[in-house]
Image (cartoon, helix red, strand yellow):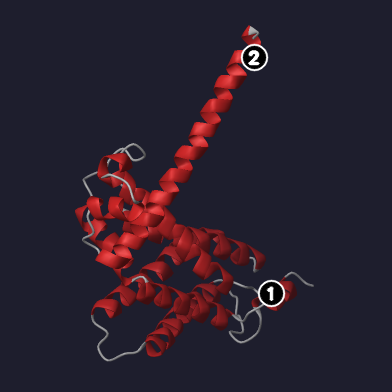
């Protein structure tokens, strides 16, 4: 063996270990999601380990502590929610269809993953000072996707893109807080009624931002066609 070949072998082993480590972390996170669905938001680390088929101590060979596991669960949740919401942001749809699609997908996801939602909420309340807040992580990720979309279309319509981020976070905050309250206290309102209510609110917010910049979108015409028209196409 030559001296020059040794680092390559070490690097190869390190890469394989890193890949295996990440794969195992993801498997444990998926097991945690199943355990949360089964046992609820107060799921214990022991129950997560049992779901994964390993001893509790085995988990902590892949996570530094409980907050690290909770943060990984949050990251996986962001992936799942994003996969549900992004298809609704199809510019071939009308603006109102896009708004309604995202809101309906969000409500549906919360209803179907009620225990996970409560788990993230519980973690947000109990998160150690200065630590990562899983609930905030999730909302910020969704708002980040909306910010990019808002920046694109505000730019296409010749508007100030600086309002994109605040608008996105405002929309997410409105939908998140209203939906969270509805999950806890429906008040006799069903999912479709809630989606209708929120769609109206969100569209009026977006419409107000656009009108302040001199842009009037037709809520019932595909967004892509309106963008093309604005660009002179």
Measured as percent of width and height from the top left, residue 120 is found at: 30, 60
Q: Quadrant of residue 191?
A: bottom left
For disc 1, the marked residue is 224
Residue 181 in the image: above or below residue 152: below
Q: Is residue 101 visible?
A: yes
> In which quadrant of the rendered image does the C terminus lie?
bottom right
- Judge from the rendering whether residue 36 lies leftward or rightward of residue 17; answer left or right: left
Residue 167 in the image: above or below residue 10: below
Measured as percent of width and height from the top left, residue 158 is found at: 64, 65
Q: Is residue 137 visible?
A: no
Mark before the other along the chain sequence, 1 or 2: 2
The span from disc 1 to disc 2 (Cα, nearest Å) is 55 Å
Depth check: give the residue in front, 232 or 191: 191
Q: Residues within 10 Å of mark 1 (few under 14, many from 20)?
A: some
Residue at x 34%, y 76% (from the top left corner)? 179
For disc 2, the marked residue is 5
> In which quadrant of the rendered image does the N terminus lie?
top right
Which element is circle 2 on? helix
């Amino acid at each position: 063996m030559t001296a020059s070949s040794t680092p390559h072998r070490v690097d190869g082993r390190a890469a394989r270990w890193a890949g295996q480590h990440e794969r195992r972390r993801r498997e444990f996170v998926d097991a945690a999601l199943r355990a949360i669905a089964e046992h609820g938001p107060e799921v214990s680390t022991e129950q997560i380990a049992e779901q994964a088929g390993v001893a509790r101590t085995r988990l902590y060979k892949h996570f530094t502590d409980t907050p690290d596991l909770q943060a990984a669960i949050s990251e996986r949740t962001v992936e799942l929610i994003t996969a549900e919401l992004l298809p609704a942001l199809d510019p071939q749809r009308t603006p109102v269809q896009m708004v309604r699609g995202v809101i309906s997908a969000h409500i549906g996801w919360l209803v179907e993953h009620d225990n996970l939602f409560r788990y993230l909420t519980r973690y947000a309340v109990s998160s150690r000072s200065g630590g990562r807040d899983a609930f905030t992580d999730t909302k910020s990720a969704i708002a980040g996707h909306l910010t990019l979309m808002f920046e694109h279309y505000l730019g296409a319509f010749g508007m100030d893109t600086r309002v994109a981020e605040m608008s996105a976070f405002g929309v997410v905050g409105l939908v998140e807080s209203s939906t969270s309250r509805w999950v806890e206290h429906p008040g006799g309102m069903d999912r479709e009624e809630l989606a209708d209510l929120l769609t109206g609110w969100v569209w009026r917010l977006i419409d107000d931002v656009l009108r302040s910049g001199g842009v009037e979108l037709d809520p019932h015409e595909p967004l892509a066609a309106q963008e093309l028209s604005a660009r002179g196409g």
